[in-house]
Amino acid sequence: MTSPKLTVDVARRERAAIVGLTGEIGLRTVARLRSAVMKCLADEPSGVVVELDRTTVASPLALGVFGALARRAAEWPGVLVVLAVSDTAIRELLRRTALDRVVPTFASVAEAVRSLGVLPPRQHASVDLPDDAGSAALARHFVTDTCIDWGVGDSADDACIIASELVENAVLHGRSRAQLRLELRRGVLTIAVRDDDPGRPRHLTVGTAPTGGRGVFMVDAIARAWGYAPTWSGGKVVWAMLATTACVDNHP
């Protein structure tokens, strides 16, 4: 039996990621589709447009992946996933499965890109950290200074714990350099660490050190939500979100 094929081409239009699919959407190709969109999200675009005109739907059940991806993208990095398809048969299938009520659907890529609008007001800061045992401490200093500067100093302690664990996972266990990025948007502080290790974040046992060594279960205990996404370069981004009392709209 010939394996179904699904090819993925990714392009940029303005700051949006355009994911062009060619081939079969079915239960045996849905994992590739999901991985491609997740990799696009790791680059934090202004939105993701998935073009379906060159596809056939082997299993309507597989279309549910778009709803799951849209919910994940809305959570992090806080962008829309939309569909572009002019094919009437596919549009009717989306209507019958009510997916078009969950994921906005447009007749063309141009129309879909226009629908994305602009990113909500946000502040961001990032720092590159070396593959070194001292990087976790550097991360904590960076997080503390940034939180104070943004007026969310009350979140600094929790943010420092999260940053410390994620950077330590990347540097000490992934043996990788790390890029730490902070973002404040609508009262939500996101801590994201990009590294070169494709492996899942490690769930380690609890350590006795005051900082570091306690594993990502500490992130799970503190963060409002967290997750990870693969990157096109072969690494990953691990992210976590904290609620704050600040609103980025109040900042210049």
Image (tube, rainbow, N blue to C red):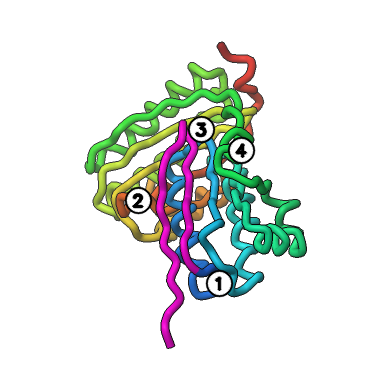
- Measure the C-alpha gap from mark 3 to mark 1: 45 Å
Which secondary structure lies at badge 1? loop
Residue visible at 56% across and 18% down? 151
Q: Are marks 4 and 1 in contact (CB under 8 Å)?
A: no
- Measure the C-alpha gap from mark 4 to mark 2: 26 Å
Q: Badge 3 is on which residue? A: 157
- Residue 111: percent from left, percent from top: 61, 38
Residue type (three-letter) at the residue carrying disc 3: Asp
125 shown above or below 87: above
Q: Badge 4 is on which residue? A: 111
- Measure the C-alpha gap from mark 3 to mark 2: 32 Å
Label 4: how many residues lie within 10 Å, few (<14), some (14-19) or many (20+)? few
Q: Badge 1 is on which residue? A: 26
The label shown at residue 232 is 2
Picture quadrant where residue 118 is located: top right
Label 3: how many residues lie within 10 Å, few (<14), some (14-19) or many (20+)? some
- Measure the C-alpha gap from mark 4 to mark 1: 26 Å
